[in-house]
Amino acid sequence: MEQHGLDIWDKLLAHAEENKFPDKADTFRFRYHGLFYVAPAQNSFMLRCRIAAGQLSAEQFRGLSEIAEDWGNGYADITTRANIQIREIAPKHSVKVLLKLQELGLTSRGSGVDNVRNITASPTAGIDPAEIIDTQPYAKALHYYILNNRDLYDLPRKFNVGF
């Protein structure tokens, strides 16, 4: 309650500079930025991205693989909600990872804790010749609304929307 998780950029910078993991309260706050301190299983961060409607360009996919190679453990996981997760990120690399995501037109903001999870759509949306309606624009519109308005943050855990 002392500080909202979306308002901790300076703290993220300081922790990266010091190569320092967060304390218990900040572990919760860092998750608002998609950084999950996964100790004791691994003494590192796991990054969870938000991928609107599960769609990536080839350039974005290459960029995610570069993040995994340069600052993670060399591989990425695809979740059931069409997110990408990269593990074994050292604290000193956490801000580099977040900035690289932004350069790719991606984000990890709001991908954890009490937030609306990744907005999903049919994997064949936009390419199925028999589809009645392409749901991608709706999934992407809600994705961007959530990112730019706080009124849907802090909903119950794992609040999920799919089109």
Image (cartoon, grey):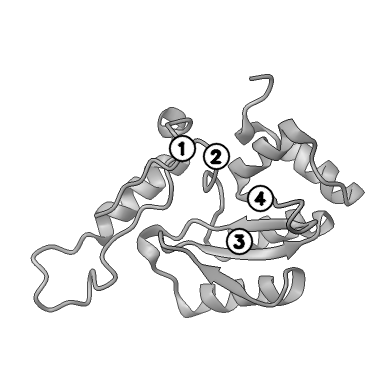
Q: How many marks?
A: 4
Mark before the other along the chain sequence, 1 or 2: 2
Question: Rounded to the nearest whole Å, what is the CA distance between mark 3 and mark 4?
Answer: 12 Å
- The label number, if any, that marks residue 101 in the structure image: 3
Mark before the other along the chain sequence, 4 or 1: 4
Q: Which residue is mark 2?
A: 113
Asked which secondary structure carries label 3, the reply is: helix
Q: Which residue is mark 4?
A: 35
Q: Please give left or right for residue 5 compared with residue 14 in the image.
A: left
- The label number, if any, that marks residue 157 in the structure image: 1
Query: Residue 122's quadrant in the figure?
Result: bottom left
Q: Please give left or right for residue 89 compared with residue 52 in the image.
A: right
Residue 144, percent across and down? 40, 47
Asked which secondary structure carries label 1, the reply is: loop
Q: Residue at x 59, y 41 (%)?
A: 32
Question: Rounded to the nearest whole Å, what is the CA distance between mark 2 and mark 4?
Answer: 10 Å
Q: Which three-letter amino acid code belongs to the residue tagged 4? A: Leu
Q: Which three-letter amino acid code belongs to the residue tagged 2? A: Val
Q: Residue at x 12, y 62 (%)?
A: 133
Is there a contact, CB below 8 Å, between mark 2 and mark 4? no
Question: Rounded to the nearest whole Å, what is the CA distance between mark 4 and mark 1?
Answer: 16 Å
Question: Rounded to the nearest whole Å, what is the CA distance between mark 2 and mark 3?
Answer: 20 Å
